[in-house]
Image (cartoon, rainbow, N blue to C red):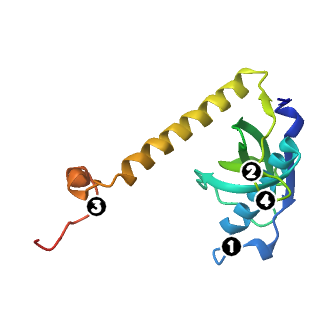
Amino acid sequence: MTYKTIDSSRITISELMQPQHSNFGGKIHGGYILNLMDQIAFACASKHSKTYCVTASVDTVDFLSPIEIGELVTMKASVNYVGRTSMVVGIRVEAENIQTGKVKHCNSSYFTMVAKDDNGNSTEVPGLIVNDKTEVKRFLKAIKRMDTKHSRKIEFDRADFSHIDYLDDLSKYRVKIELPEQ
């Protein structure tokens, strides 16, 4: 098996946000940012794997700060984790007011990408060389996110999953339960 450093597939892109990218509120549309994020995740994963990649899942997209028309958006992507055929690409999105130089963190997200061969079958990707504490932490956090997702899937997909088991949990939420008597 071959191994590659994280630095060898790291990607950074920047784009000036224009009026056609805005929503009705005058801010840059979240869907446009997601599209750019998907593109950089593809580029990063493809650079690591040297093959075509597809998006398998997106984990945690929290829009922390709105992006304004005229700001310079910079996205940084790196492979944080590799499995046999999949990679988790971490993406950080920042927006800079080009007049003041003020930079704000707008969101971070994790895209799971799967490498494909010419026939569309999943194909093995190179292993990952981690060479600093931050890279080790990112690899470990990716494993923890996958473990949490797997546990949640097992719990929710159980054949005997019942809302009755969780009704007490709802007491702290703004919900009124009015189920018909059965």
**Are the residues flagged by discs 1 and 3 in contact, CB closer than 8 Å?**
no
* Residue position marked by numbered label 3 in the rendering: 174
Is residue 145 among what the camera can see?
yes
Q: Nearer the viewer, mark 2 or mark 1?
A: 2
In this rendering, the answer to whether 87 lies above or below 16 is above
Q: Residue 83 appears at what percent x and percent y?
A: 69, 37
Q: Nearer the viewer, mark 1 or mark 3?
A: 3
**Are the residues flagged by discs 4 and 2 in contact, CB closer than 8 Å?**
no
* Residue position marked by numbered label 2 in the rendering: 122
* Residue position marked by numbered label 4 in the rendering: 120
Of callouts 3 and 4, the N-terminal one: 4
Quadrant of res 145:
top right
Q: In the rendered view, does 111 fall on the left or right side of 115?
A: left
Q: Residue 125 appears at what percent x and percent y?
A: 79, 40
Q: Given the image, on which type of amino acid does mark 4 rest? A: Gly
Q: Given the image, on which type of amino acid does mark 1 rest? A: Gly
Of callouts 3 and 2, the N-terminal one: 2
How many angstroms separate mark 4 from mark 1 (CA)?
A: 40 Å
Q: How many marks?
A: 4
Secondary element at tag 3: loop
How many angstroms separate mark 3 from mark 2 (CA)?
A: 44 Å
Numbered circle sitting on residue 26? 1
**Are the residues flagged by discs 3 and 4 in contact, CB closer than 8 Å?**
no
**Are the residues flagged by discs 2 and 1 in contact, CB closer than 8 Å?**
no
Q: In the rendered view, does 139 fall on the left or right side of 62?
A: right
Q: Residue 122 appears at what percent x and percent y?
A: 74, 50
Residue at figure coordinates x 84%, y 43% from the top left: 49
How many angstroms separate mark 2 from mark 1 (CA)?
A: 41 Å
Of callouts 2 and 1, the N-terminal one: 1
How many angstroms separate mark 4 from mark 2 (CA)?
A: 7 Å
Q: Given the image, on which type of amino acid does mark 2 rest? A: Ser
